[in-house]
Amino acid sequence: MSIFNEFLVLGNVWDVQSALSCRKLGFGVIGTSSAAVAASLGFEDGEDMPFS
């Protein structure tokens, strides 16, 4: 992807630690997926992951 002749480099995270690592490495933006977050917490992807 190119925006104004600059490339967008997107760090992909799956938990808090990986997000902090991307931040420390200087990523301006990060991405994630519901499957990655669910798997890191021991759940399958879907709408049934508890948030409490």
Image (cartoon, rainbow, N blue to C red):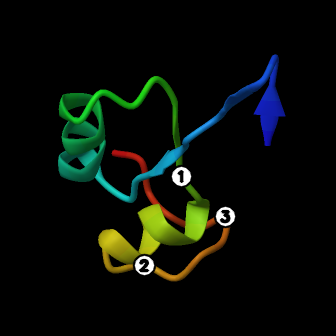
Q: Please name the residue shown 80% across and 34% down the image.
A: 2
How many residues crowd around disc 3 within 10 Å: few (fewer than 14), some, or many (20 or more)?
few
| Displayed quadrant of residue 33 | bottom right
State whether residue 47 is above or below residue 26: below
Element class at badge 2: loop
Q: Which mark is residue 15?
A: none
Residue 49 place in picture, x, y as percent: 50, 64
Q: Quadrant of the C terminus?
A: top left
**Residue bearing mark 1:** 32
Q: Quadrant of the N terminus?
A: top right
Amino acid of disc 1 = Thr
- Distance from label 1 to label 3 (Cα)? 16 Å
Residue nearest the observer in this picture, 26 or 13:
26
| Displayed quadrant of residue 37 | bottom left
Residue nearest the observer in this picture, 3 or 11:
3
Residue nearest the observer in this picture, 17 or 8:
8
Q: Please name the residue shown 80% across and 24% down the image.
A: 3
Depth-wise, is mark 2 or mark 1 nearer the camera?
A: 1
Residue 35 place in picture, x, y as percent: 56, 71
Along the polypeptide, which appears first: circle 1 or circle 3?
1
**Residue bearing mark 2:** 43
State whether residue 43 is above or below residue 38: below
Q: Please name the residue shown 59% across and 61% down the image.
A: 34
Along the polypeptide, which appears first: circle 2 or circle 1?
1
State whether residue 42 is above or below residue 20: below
Left or right: 12 in relation to 26: right
Residue nearest the observer in this picture, 16 or 31:
31
Element class at badge 1: loop
Amino acid of disc 2 = Phe
**Residue bearing mark 3:** 47
State whether residue 43 is above or below residue 19: below
- Distance from label 3 to label 2 (Cα)? 10 Å
